Amino acid sequence: MGEAIFAPNDLLVSDVPVITRNVTIVSGQNLKRGAVLGNITASDKYTLSASAAADGSQTPALVLATDCDASAGDVVAAAYASGAFDSTKLILGAGHTAATVEAAFRKAGAPLYVRVLK
């Protein structure tokens, strides 16, 4: 089984309450803290959200809270379900921008916010 490791990097900004929950990261990936995750509907597992996906994971849903090596198998890791994030620290999948991720969070009514810091 893989592992998840916390590595702080100033990802969180603002005073928005932070809430995490444990999710299963699908095998075959090595993701870093700040990866924007999408939910694979059929398995209820999470992967890096890519806009061209057609399995449900195309919609950004959560932000990975820890580094996560799932290259050898599924891993349970913490993900942010609430918080505000520095847009430059997010890891975006193909086809996503900070603006599209923020729009998806707003459409879902999720208490996740993307901040462009100057």
Image (spheres, helix red, strand yellow):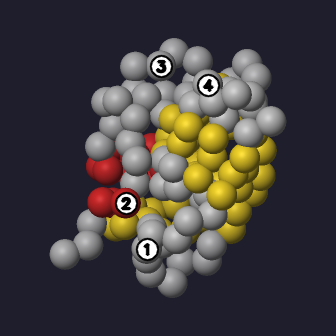
Determine whether, in the image, residue 6 is placed left or right of residue 54. Answer: right
State the mark number for residue 89. Answer: 2
Amino acid type at mark 4: Gly
- SS label for mark 3: loop
Whether residue 23 is visible, yes or no, is: no
Q: Give the residue pinned by disc 3.
A: 53
Real-space CA distance between mark 1 and mark 3, rounded to the nearest whole angstrom? 29 Å
Q: Residues within 10 Å of mark 3 (few under 14, many from 20)?
A: some
Q: Earlier in the sequence, mark 4 or mark 2?
A: 4
Question: Which residue is under mark 4?
Answer: 28
The tag earlier along the polypeptide, 1 or 4, is 1
Pair 1/3: label in front? 1
Within-10-Å neighbours for mark 2: few <14, some 14–19, many 20+: some
User: Which mark, residue 10?
Assistant: 1
Cα gap from disc 2 to disc 1, whole angstroms: 8 Å
Mark 2 touching mark 1, by CB under 8 A?
Answer: yes
- Which mark is nearer the camera, 4 or 2? 4
Real-space CA distance between mark 1 and mark 4, rounded to the nearest whole angstrom: 27 Å
Bin the neighbour count of mark 1 within 10 Å (Cα to Cα): few under 14, some 14-19, many 20 and up.
few
**Amino acid carrying mark 1 in the image:** Asp
Near mark 4 (Cα within 10 A), the count class, few <14, some 14-19 or many ≥20, is: few
Q: Residue at left 19%, top 75%?
A: 118
Q: Residue furthest left?
A: 118
- In the image, residue 56 sits, relative to residue 89, either above or below, namely above
Of 91 and 19, the residue lying toward us: 91
Establish if 76 lies above or below 86. Answer: above
Q: Secondary structure at mark 1?
A: loop
Distance between the Cα atoms at labels 4 and 2? Answer: 23 Å
